[in-house]
Amino acid sequence: MKNVSEVTSFHLYAYYGMEELKPLYFFIFLMIYITIIVENVVLIGVIYHEKSLHEPMYLLVCNLAVNGLYGSTALLPAVLSNLLLRSYDISLALCQTQIYAVHTYAITEFTILAAMSYDRYVAICYPLLYHAIMSQRLVKLIVFTWLFPLLAFLIVFFFTLQLRYCERTIEKLYCMNYILVKLACSDTSIVNIIGLLSVVAYTVPQICMIFYSYAHILRVCLASFSKSKLKALRTCTPHLLAIVNYAIGCFLEIALSRFNTTGLPYQTKLFLSLYFLIFPPILNPAIYGLSIHFIRVRLFRLLSRKRRIEAN
């Protein structure tokens, strides 16, 4: 009988597809990581230094940027290291650490987006009470968006940590919980059921919050359509784009794990598997950066107009 305790590392088979163009892939991933760091740090810096942006929505955007840095750091340094050292093995401990980081990033991203939808709901449906409500609840919201994913995933992760493994080949660039469970020697039926239930627990409340918020936002805007309501509705555009972008990434990851993709080119599978970890951290700062730019332009115009009136 095979000694199952021997499996203390795993082989990341997907790296072999990069063999012929390894320097190019290393350069691309390095540029992506630098771009993510620069964009998100700049966004956080602008919000921190610009007093006009010290609003609940933009403080939540800061948390979204921090989470983007967290998620990309869970993946890209390891990818760059593997390409540079030409080692495609990952220890069990590092694999488990990466699983925890990647999954908590994913849950935190969705939870922050749900909190941001609540912020837009209060801002548009209760504009006069917005600052009073959000000033009382903002800190609690932010703490919850981080503590809930970090603690909730531990429940599922605890069962994964108890498993012993017979196989060591992972068909991806990074570790995922469901892949590690598949490599286990023992019966994983209970772990799989807990995993499915956890997906519901990690996503349904956020989805309900997002749909509830935007259903009420649309109802209020349609009931009393005005220029001010239209302007308020426009503030939802960056948030909706961020939700769509992240939803695409999640859908691609689910599709890749559930369907037979052997017929797809290597580059396509690579793109699909990395989308939710790379594109939200890249595109979110660009989306909200444009929003901040328009806010600063409007503030500049208002101040200029005020100065002209005072001068006359």
Image: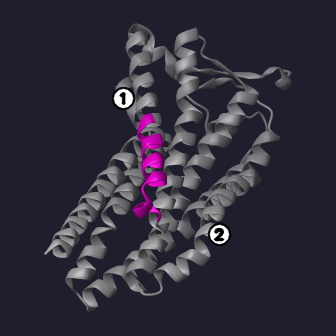
Q: Is residue 165 left or right of residue 12?
A: right
In the picture as drawn, the residue positioned furthest to the left comes out as 312
- On screen, residue 111 above or below 178: below
Q: Would you say residue 270 sits in the magenta stretch?
A: no
The foreground one among 103 and 47 is 47
Position of residue 174 measured from the top left corner of the image (x, y, whole percent): 57, 30
Quote the CA–CA distance across marks 1 and 2: 47 Å
Q: Amino acid at mark 2?
A: Lys
Does residue 89 appear left or right of residue 286 in this picture? right
For the residue pair 126 and 248, the one nearer the viewer reads as 126
Residue 288's x, y, as percent? 36, 54
Looking at the image, residue 294 lies above or below residue 12: below
- Residue at the (26%, 91%) spot, across then down: 224
Callout 1 amino acid: Gly
Most foreground residue, 89 or 241: 241
Mainly helix, strand or loop, the magenta region?
Answer: helix
**Numbered range of the magenta stretch:** 38-54
Q: Which residue does the image show at 33% across and 56% down from the upper left? A: 292
Query: Which SS class for mark 1?
Result: loop
The residue lying at 75 percent from left, 43 percent from top is 160
- 270 vs 299, left or right, is right
Q: Percent from the top left, x then y, of residue 44?
A: 48, 48
Residue 140 badge: 2
| Residue 133 image offset from top left, x and y in percent | 54, 81
Q: Which residue is mark 1?
A: 263
Nearer to us of marks 1 and 2 is 2
Q: Quadrant of the N terminus?
A: top right
